[in-house]
């Protein structure tokens, strides 16, 4: 598993590998797997502020890499679709997952969480990148928006 970041080189964003973490998951098959990675590897379920990460995946749900997209305060994190889409395109991803922690240890989404999910679905769709899920993690539990709010992930007709 590779953690990525972006830097400017000659006034252009470039994706760089920050570090490689040995973890034996190459395919993301369920929200439980994401929860396990966030709890046991990234350890964001123990943080006192909100952190948001994006998991970039290829067309077969194989993990290409992970990058932090926001580090907020105790009850909010700023998530901008532009930066997320740029990093996913640089990574060569076809699909992605958004994951963030709730320091309150309450996994239910806020109104802002739902709004961000809708915006990322729409932005990804325009660029051919599928948002597979937005998962909120706590130490003991998780909330999968795909499992609870399927309509957000369906294309409008």
Image: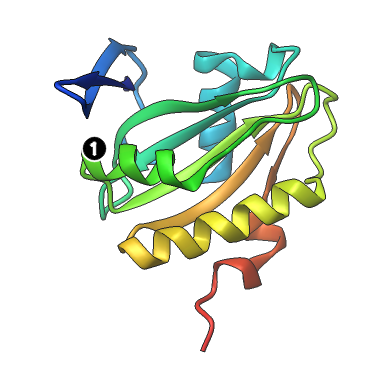
Residue 93 in the figure: left or right of residue 10: right
| Residue 48 horizontal/vertical position (percent) | 75, 12
Residue 134 in the figure: left or right of residue 115: left
| Residue 71 horizontal/vertical position (percent) | 60, 21
Task: Name the residue: 26% across, 48% down.
Answer: 58
The 10 Å Cα crowd at callout 1, few under 14, some 14 to 19, many 20 or more, is some
Question: Which image quarter: residue 47?
Answer: top right
Question: Which image quarter: residue 84?
Answer: top left
Task: Name the residue: 26% across, 45% down.
Answer: 89
Task: Name the residue: 72% across, 17% down.
Answer: 49
Residue 64 in the figure: left or right of residue 130: left
Judged from the image, the secondary structure of the residue bearing numbered disc 1 is helix
Whether residue 29 is visible to the viewer of this picture, yes or no, is no
| Residue 80 horizontal/vertical position (percent) | 53, 41
- The residue most toward the left is 10
How many discs appear? 1
Q: Is residue 109 above or below residue 155?
A: above
Q: Is residue 116 above or below residue 73?
A: below
Task: Name the residue: 73% across, 27% down.
Answer: 138
Q: Is residue 98 above or below residue 3?
A: below
Q: Quadrant of the N terminus?
A: top left
Whether residue 38 is visible to the viewer of this picture, yes or no, is yes
- Coloring scheme used: rainbow
Which residue was labeled with disc 1?
A: 91
| Residue 2 horizontal/vertical position (percent) | 30, 21
- The residue most toward the bottom is 157
Question: Which image quarter: residue 18?
Answer: top left
């Amino acid at each position: 598993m590779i953690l990525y970041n972006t830097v400017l080189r000659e006034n252009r964003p470039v994706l760089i590998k920050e570090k490689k973490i040995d973890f034996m998951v190459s395919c993301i098959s369920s929200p439980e797997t994401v929860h396990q990675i966030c709890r046991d590897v990234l350890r964001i379920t123990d943080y006192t502020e909100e952190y948001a990460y994006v998991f970039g995946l290829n067309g077969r749900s194989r993990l290409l890499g992970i990058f932090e997209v926001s580090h907020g305060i105790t009850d909010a994190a700023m998530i901008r679709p532009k930066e997320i889409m740029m990093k996913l395109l640089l990574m060569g991803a076809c699909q992605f997952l958004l994951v963030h922690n709730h320091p309150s240890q309450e996994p239910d989404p806020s109104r802002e969480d739902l709004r961000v999910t809708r915006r990322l679905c729409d932005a990804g769709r325009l660029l051919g990148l599928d948002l597979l899920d937005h998962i909120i993690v706590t130490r003991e539990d998780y909330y999968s928006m795909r499992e609870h709010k399927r309509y957000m992930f369906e294309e409008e007709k």
